[in-house]
Image: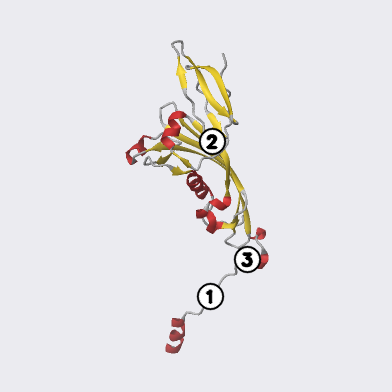
């Protein structure tokens, strides 16, 4: 009896029609690299998650969690428009993994990891600050505010309405939470000396002149 591999890579949209017989087995139909593959699997043994080697443009989190779908791919930094005001350069890519699933309490979840570097603008010297990203996140997928209080510790709420979400928007939300709102080098010695912002000289209070005239 053949079992499915831990990881399957698809290059195109795939369907999985399975016709089960009385003994609990069926033919799983998959299309790999334009080739049709038939694998005999046990209905009770087919539980492995499929890791698709490409990020979809849109996701429907609740449905993906119900079927346990996973994705990985790259996100060009220049596609993250809300991050742009903080960037010194929009070059580069981020490596992303997304895993939708049901946990042991039947809570729909999205767990992910984002790795890479973004070039931010140091607000002290206005030079380039390379900021490394290696962040993981765990989201509990809910469709009403009332469900927030029922999420266990360790999950941040992901409120969905049933409409598809743009994948890059979900990833950008996590990146924005990770980068500092006022990025700067760790110390002034790391800043570009020619561009360090100088303190603004204090101006004499005009009311102080009036006080001198009264003396």
The alpha-carbon separation of the residues under discs 1 and 2 comes to 56 Å
Q: Nearer the viewer, residue 38 or 94?
A: 38
Residue 92 or 86: which is nearer the viewer?
A: 92
Q: CA distance from mark 1 to mark 3?
A: 18 Å
Observer-nearest of 27 and 94: 27
Residue 100: percent from left, percent from top: 48, 33
Residue at image mark 3: 196
Colour style of the rendered protein structure: secondary structure
Kindly state the secondary structure of the residue where label 3 is placed: loop
Q: Residues within 10 Å of mark 2 (few under 14, many from 20)?
A: some
Quarter containing the C terminus = bottom left
Spatial distance from mark 2 to mark 3, Cα to Cα? 43 Å
Q: Which mark is on residue 164?
A: none
How crowded pointer 3 is (Cα within 10 Å; few <14, some 14-19, many 20+) is rated as: some
User: CB of mark 1 within 8 Å of CB of mark 3?
Assistant: no
Viewer-nearest residue: 45 or 120: 45
Q: Is residue 37 visible?
A: yes
Q: Is 188 positioned to the left or the right of 213 in the image?
A: right
Task: Answer above or below: position of 42 versus 30.
Answer: above
Left or right: 147, with 55 as reference point: left
| Residue hosting label 2 | 71
Q: Residue at x 44, y 32 (%)?
A: 65
- Residue 5 position within the rendered picture, expressed as x and y whole percent measured from the top left: 58, 23
Q: Nearer the viewer, mark 1 or mark 3?
A: 3
Q: Earlier in the sequence, mark 1 or mark 3?
A: 3
Position of the N terminus by quadrant: top right
| Relative vertical location of residue 154 with respect to residue 76 in this rendering, above or below | above
The residue drawn where x is 54% and y is 56% is 84
**Residue at mark 1:** 202
């Amino acid at each position: 009896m053949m079992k499915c591999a831990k990881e399957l890579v698809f290059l195109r949209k795939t369907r999985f029609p399975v016709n089960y017989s009385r003994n609990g087995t069926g033919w799983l139909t998959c299309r790999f690299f334009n080739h049709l593959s038939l694998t005999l699997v046990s209905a009770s043994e087919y539980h492995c998650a499929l890791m698709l080697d490409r990020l979809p443009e849109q996701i429907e989190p609740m449905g993906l969690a119900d079927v346990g779908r996973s994705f990985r791919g790259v996100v060009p930094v220049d596609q993250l428009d809300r991050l742009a005001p903080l960037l010194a350069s929009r070059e580069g890519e981020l490596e992303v993994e997304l895993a939708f699933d049901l946990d042991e309490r039947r809570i729909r979840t999205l767990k992910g990891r984002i790795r890479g570097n973004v070039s931010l603008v140091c607000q002290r010297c206005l030079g380039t600050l390379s900021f490394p990203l290696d962040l993981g996140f765990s989201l509990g997928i809910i469709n009403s505010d009332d469900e927030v209080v029922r999420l266990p510790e360790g999950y941040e709420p992901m409120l969905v309405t049933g409409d598809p979400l743009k994948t890059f928007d979900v990833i950008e939300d996590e990146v924005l939470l990770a980068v500092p709102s006022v990025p700067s080098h760790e110390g002034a010695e790391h800043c570009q000396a020619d561009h360090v912002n100088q303190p603004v000289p204090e101006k004499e209070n005009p009311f102080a002149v009036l006080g001198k005239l009264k003396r």
